Image (spheres, rainbow, N blue to C red):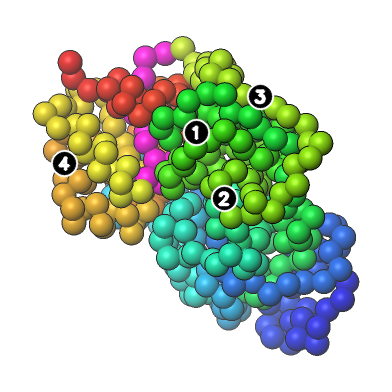
Amino acid sequence: MLLTGEEERMLSGAEGRAVGKAMQLIVALGEVFGAEKLVRITSAQIAGVSYGNIGDAGLELLEDWASAGARVRVKATLNPAGMDLERWREMGVGEEYYGKQIRIIKAFERMGVETTCTCTPYLAGNLPSFGDHVAWSESSAVVYANSVLGARTNREGGPSALAAALTGRTPLYGFHLDEGRRATAIVEVGAELGSPHEFSLLGYAVGMRMGAGVPFFEGIKRAEVEDLKILSAALAASGGIGMFHMNGVTPEARFQDTTGLERIHVSAQDLEGARERLSSHGDPDLACIGCPHCSVKEIAEIARMLEGRRVRAGKGLWVWTSRAAYDEAKRMGYVQAIEAAGGKVFADTCMVVCPLEASGFSHMVTNSCKAAHYVPSTSGIGASVRSLESAVSKVLEG
Ligand code: F3S
């Protein structure tokens, strides 16, 4: 692989042991994928933050790199941690877990990473421009960045995104190149998509059908931020999809030549099939909303839904969001409205990366296919997927 003088210097360890190791990782990755050179990045989104996911080995590595003086060279933000950094006790998280999670956050802080702890960095200040090369490692955010923002990132893992942040480089292959971003199949949407939940079902159904590739959606008249972020999450959950185009909506759709591509039709029955596949038997006792993290608009919608209503005794309504959205929603009174009705709004974490089993609940209902896909395996809790209204009403009185 062709390296510049500066990159050779980093690789040699002349800029510090941690930078040397980071550059080794980047170069090895590039060689595996046949990259001819590296490209400068403008931002990183780093996953692998939850103590439950990375454990003691991950914690020790991060502290080692932080102690070795490693510092990020570009804007770098963090994925959700394993707990609400302030209200962890209310989630049932123990002292030892808390202590180690805080050490992880501090190690990232020492390396200069912004401890945003959200999977929606594009709503929290990490907003790359069209055409920017970035290294993001949250699968839903990768799809959003490539598709909606027109930024360029591969599906990085936590270590490779951190290594990219420390070197300011990533290997030039895959979604960084024009040919990696071309549509590979046309998806004709024959179902009405009236809410983010339906976009989530669509993403899950298409991910299952295609597995990989770049879908080109036709027949969707309108999509808002909330629709696009939940669609992105579902596409990456059921398949290995890292990018889509949507006719009339996403910025690179108009440059696609779709002549001769395979056509996939998705009907209302396909969406129903995705819902059934993700729903196990059981009476939900916990409604979880916020995968990906809720926007302020979504928190406001939940608050409105709870007017004059209460969460039933023995049931829970947990809403998950970023610290930035939480603070704004609190200023607007939405957090107080949800909590006055018996719900909880947690920041910094989510139902998948926190130890949800510590909550004491046994069956989660959600509007997000990604959450329903992962929660049974990460916490052993049953899952069902429904519309937002239906999921919330499952745990309310009356
Ligand atoms: Fe975000 Fe957690 Fe879902 S990281 S996309 S809320 S699984």
Mark 1 / mark 2, whichever is N-terminal? 1
Q: Residue furthest left?
A: 308
CB atoms of marks 2 and 4 within 8 Å: no
Q: Residue at x 22, y 23 (%)?
A: 396
Mark 2 / mark 4, whichever is N-terminal? 2
Q: Residue at x 39, y 40 (%)?
A: 290
CB atoms of marks 1 and 3 within 8 Å: no
Q: Which image quadrant for residue 10?
A: bottom right
How many angstroms separate mark 1 from mark 2 (CA)? 15 Å
Q: Which residue is mark 2?
A: 250
Q: Residue at x 72, y 61 (%)?
A: 176
Instruction: Categorize mark 4 by other alpha carbons within 10 Å: few (<14), some (14-19), many (20+).
Output: many
Q: Which residue is mark 3?
A: 265
Residue 354 drawn in magenta: no
Mark 1 / mark 3, whichever is N-terminal? 1
How many angstroms separate mark 3 from mark 4 (CA)? 42 Å
Q: Which image quadrant for residue 165?
A: bottom right
How many angstroms separate mark 1 from mark 3 (CA)? 15 Å
How many angstroms separate mark 3 from mark 2 (CA)? 20 Å
Residue type at tag 1: Phe
Q: How far from the left and from the top, in percent, is residue 333?
A: 16, 49
Q: How far from the left and from the top, in percent, is residue 41?
A: 64, 71
Q: Main secondary structure of the magenta part?
A: strand
Q: Residue at x 20, y 36 (%)?
A: 304
Does 275 appear above or below 301?
A: above
Question: Residue 337's mark?
Answer: 4
Residue type at tag 3: His
Q: Which residue is mark 1?
A: 199
